[in-house]
Amino acid sequence: MKTGFLLVLLGSILITGCASSGEVIPAETQPDELALSDEARLVRISQSMPRVDREFRAVWVATVDNIDWPSEPGLPVLQQKAEMMELLDRAALMNMNAIIFQIRPTADAFYKSELEPWSYYLTGENGLAPSPEYDPLQFAIEEAHRRGIELHAWFNPYRAYHQSAPDTLSGAHVSDRLPGSVHRYGEMLWMDPGSETATEHSVSVILDVVERYDIDGVHLDDYFYPYSINDEDGNRVEFPDSSFYELTGDGLSRGDWRRRNVDQLIERLYSGIKERKPWVLFGISPFGIWRPGYPEGITGFDAYANLYADAKKWLQEGWVDYFTPQLYWKLDSSGQPYGALLSWWVEQNLKNRHIWPGNYTSRIILEGNSHWEPDEVVAQVRHTRQVSGATGNVHFSMRAIMPADHGMGSALAEGVYETPALRPRTTWLGMNAPPAPGLAMQTLGDQEYVTLQTTGNVDVRYWIVHEQRTDGWATRVVPGWNRVISIPEQTDEDKTMAFVVRAVNRLGMESEPSILLVH
């Protein structure tokens, strides 16, 4: 081991692209490698080091009806925490790099809030705090970041009550606080998007979380105006928003007015998030079809006309940082083919935002004609990788990739997620790449370490660590809080020859590499 090590910053090298993990990738290391000059070795290292995938690999963790977490309402706090850690351990094992955690399913809270009551799905009673009291969102953020996983907070902006819960609601619930702005629609309660009071409340709730928590993203799904219901005679029941339409319709048709209401919410959220924390991403996962006929041959539900969601407009205006259209159909679907829909959404991406389609991975646990085999989902991920402009996938939902006989998790982990990946770079939010880290050798007893150091007030979310060994390269993505890398025991046959380390910030921007020659 050298006692006088060499640290060099290679300012002209920028590493991008694909692939690698802790496995050893053979290198063209010649027997006289160590006989080369340090300068020659640095050149060879810059030419031979592997690269790391850039791909968003996320999974939804749904709390409504206790789909994913917690497994039932009112569990002891220790069991809730254990279940969350099990989910996160599974995500980490599968090389996922983000979870999308539903923290406001029905105008309630999976975190400590002065604006809305604790969720029934957490404690078994709307408005009842967990005991002993803790903050599930804060806990999930800390545990996710400890594992190198992003956490995106998932909100339902308008749904106020879901029929899977008892209808006993806290006095702090929006149905009591803003009764004129909340309507019963079938078995659910819904905040009226045409009510400025209701919209202001939802915006305040979401921005409160942005301000108080170290989240990586804000996420909305496909629920804007509710999916329509029919009466006993099969006739569509109109959403009861006539009073607000008469006040603020401004001569627009009812449909255009409703779409304007939702448009204004999306634009306000995007600007509000960026004013507070520009690095927090804003993402939406709309219904996967904008309108039938787009692209040609597409049939099915019209989200533009029925949910009043002009999702194409939001993407084209750049009111999002990432877009996750729910492409919940097979590759060979006759009326809704996955590939054609994905390509169409990519074509609408005029502002070059991230396109990360959503996959209905939970089909694996459905039966009959709704059931899919694991190879369908794996094939969809592979297809996404072939579409220029699409750089990741989001899976619904976590329970589908937990260990089970159907093998969905194993199929992904062994088929397409066998090596780690970083989230693609978000270049339009104005954050510069961090400076190259400082590397230093330290010894404690018989163990030698490399310490990682930053200059200035730099928030490092990840380190990309390449270790050059005698028989090749090993590469790891290490959480940013970890500032120490142990050096393996050395033998004549297997030596660590060099470390190459890059710092990665919140937006995926990576530093130039620092190289430490060890032998």
Image (cartoon, helix red, strand yellow):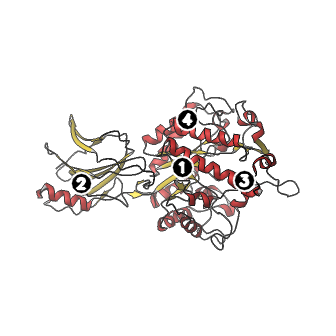
- Residue annotated with mark 2: 10
Picture residue at 61% right of the left edge, 50% below the top: 266
The mark that comes first in sequence, 1 or 3, is 3
* Residue 442 locus on image (x, y percent): 21, 38
Q: Is residue 319 left or right of residue 505?
A: right
**Residue 242 in sight from this viewpoint:** yes
Label placed on residue 258 = 3
The mark that comes first in sequence, 4 or 2, is 2
Q: Secondary structure at mark 2?
A: loop
Picture residue at 75% right of the left edge, 33% below the top: 176
Q: Nearer the viewer, residue 346 or 33?
A: 346
* Residue 146 locus on image (x, y percent): 43, 40
Label placed on residue 492 = none
- Residue annotated with mark 1: 282
Q: CA distance from mark 3 to mark 2?
A: 55 Å
- Residue annotated with mark 4: 136
